[in-house]
Amino acid sequence: MPNLRSPRFNCILVSLFFFTLLQIQTKVLCYQYKVGDLDSWGIPTSSNSQVYDKWSKYHTLKIDDSLLFLYPPSQDSVIQVTEESYKSCNLKDPILYMNNGNSLFNITKEGDFYFTSGEVGHCQKNQKLHVTVGVGGNTNALAPTNSLPEYAPSYPTVFGTIPISPSSSPHLTSNFPFLILGFILCAMLSSSLYPNLMTKE
């Protein structure tokens, strides 16, 4: 049975505490956003024809977040397109095609992303979304205009970590300082609680 008063046990306990905090921080930083919030992915109503424009202006997205598109798979789909195809509603040669009704798009890099329905005629009826991730992104999120409501609710849902490609591992480098801090605090705690640790008993 381990000696619960030993400095080594205290050091292990403090290290486990910081490691747990590190894991919680990593998981909470990733959000899954339902596109349209309470509205599912579909043709906007005439009373709210700019729903996706408004939605993107009130959400600041970052790498490792994801977009969830919910829709009846027999009636709709989602395609990722270029800026030109987005503006002209060109459905040919999409970058990505999703049609399972529960489509998840993981954000793995900064930049502009363009989506539209894969169904003919839906894009012309404003069923399209443009989001900006990273530098220069979503400056409108902090300054609403008169045409937008004062408060647009956000409903991020945390489902744990989102898989990322093996080539990118930002969590290891961004959390490294926390590990160092944990070991320093552990050493300081041990030396202050047990100043005679190095002397023989």
Image (cartoon, grey):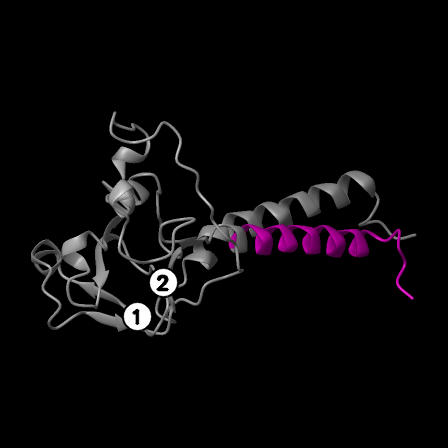
Q: Amino acid at mark 2?
A: Asn
Residue 143 visible here? yes
Q: Nearer the viewer, mark 2 or mark 1?
A: 1
Quadrant (top left/top right/bottom left/bottom right) for the N terminus: bottom right
Image point 36% across, 62% down: which residue? 106
Tell me where residue 192 appears, x and y as whole percent.
77, 38
In the image: residue 169, left or right of residue 99: right
Identify which residue, 167 or 136, lies in the foreground: 136
At label 2, counting other C-alpha atoms closer than 10 Å, the crowd grade (few under 14, some 14-19, many 20 or more) is: some
In the image: residue 192, left or right of residue 173: right
Mark identifier at residue 63? none
The residue segment tinted magenta is 1-26
Mark 1 sits on what residue?
Answer: 75
Mark 2 sits on what residue?
Answer: 106
> Residue furthest toward the front?
46
Q: Amino acid at mark 1?
A: Gln
| Image vertical order of residue 57 relative to residue 16, above or below | above
Tell me where residue 117 appears, x and y as whole percent.
23, 63
Residue 195 visible here? no
Q: Are marks 2 and 1 in contact (CB under 8 Å)?
A: no
Query: Which of pointers 2 and 1 lies earlier in the amino acid sequence?
Result: 1
The mark tally for this picture is 2
Image point 59% across, 45% down: which residue? 181
Residue 5, magenta (yes or no):
yes
Identify which residue, 5 or 158, lies in the foreground: 158
| Image vertical order of residue 103 relative to residue 86, above or below | below
| Image vertical order of residue 31 relative to residue 140, above or below | below
